[in-house]
Image (spheres, rainbow, N blue to C red):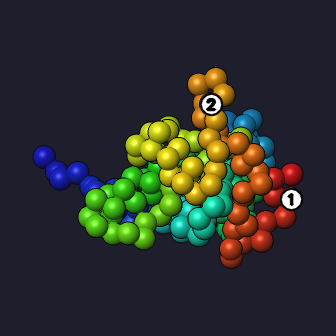
């Protein structure tokens, strides 16, 4: 039986990505026309690493930055989300190995400021990390969100995003 890849190995495995493809077939119903970039895992991680303490970013903002970087209409929501999850798990793996400066994945939120329950440690671990950085986390129904998260959204260095969060 082959050895399972570590999270860090998964993060480094680009799988011939990034790749920009024409939106076609059934995808046009959901995404319209144009092009879609399928990012490399490290690209998602690099953006997540740039978010300073006290600031936040959403997966949607990461997707906009990736699309702009590659001159695409959109970035694939599925792979971007999966690669953010890989980056989060790789960061925890690095922490377990004694590394201190890891990707601050807890600063990457889902839409509308929701904490990602699939990140390591679940909602409660991220809540503690976010609150230690000055954010207030509240529960809305079954979701946990960062209150007034819009006020803490970071500008993404290296990418100039027009019409961001409009």
Q: Who's the residue at 86% across and 51% down the image? A: 166
Q: Is residue 150 visible?
A: yes
Q: Secondary structure at mark 2?
A: strand
Q: Residue furthest top?
A: 141
Q: Residue at x 70, y 63 (%)?
A: 154
Residue 163's label in the rendered image is 1
Q: Residue furthest left?
A: 1
Residue at the location (45% across, 57% down)? Answer: 87
State yes or no: discs 2 and 1 in contact (Cβ < 8 Å).
Answer: no
Query: Which residue position is annotated with label 2?
Result: 139
Between 22 and 120, which is closer to the camera in this rendering? 120
Using the rendered image of the protein, determine whether residue 59 is visible from the camera's viewpoint.
Answer: no
* Residue 43 image offset from top left, x and y in percent: 54, 66
Q: Position of residue 59 (x, y in %)?
A: 63, 51
Quarter occupied by residue 96: bottom left
**CA–CA distance between discs 2 and 1?**
29 Å
Eyeballing the image, is 127 above or below 90?
above
Q: Position of residue 102 (x, y in %)?
A: 43, 66
Q: Earlier in the sequence, mark 2 or mark 1?
A: 2
């Amino acid at each position: 039986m082959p050895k399972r890849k570590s999270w860090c190995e998964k993060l480094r495995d680009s799988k011939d990505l990034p790749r920009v493809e024409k939106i076609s077939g059934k995808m046009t119903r959901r995404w319209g026309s144009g092009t879609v970039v399928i990012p490399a895992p490290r690209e998602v991680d690099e953006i997540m690493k740039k978010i300073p303490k006290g600031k936040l970013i959403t997966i949607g903002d990461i997707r906009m930055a990736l699309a702009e970087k590659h001159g695409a209409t959109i970035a694939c929501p599925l792979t971007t989300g999966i690669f953010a999850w890989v980056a989060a798990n790789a960061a925890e793996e690095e922490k377990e190995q004694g590394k201190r400066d890891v990707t601050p994945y807890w600063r990457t939120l889902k839409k509308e400021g929701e904490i990602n329950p699939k990140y390591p440690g679940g909602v409660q671990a991220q809540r503690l990390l976010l609150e230690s950085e000055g954010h207030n986390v509240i529960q809305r129904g079954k979701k946990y969100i960062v209150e007034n998260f819009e006020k803490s959204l970071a500008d993404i260095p290296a990418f100039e995003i027009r019409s961001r969060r409009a």
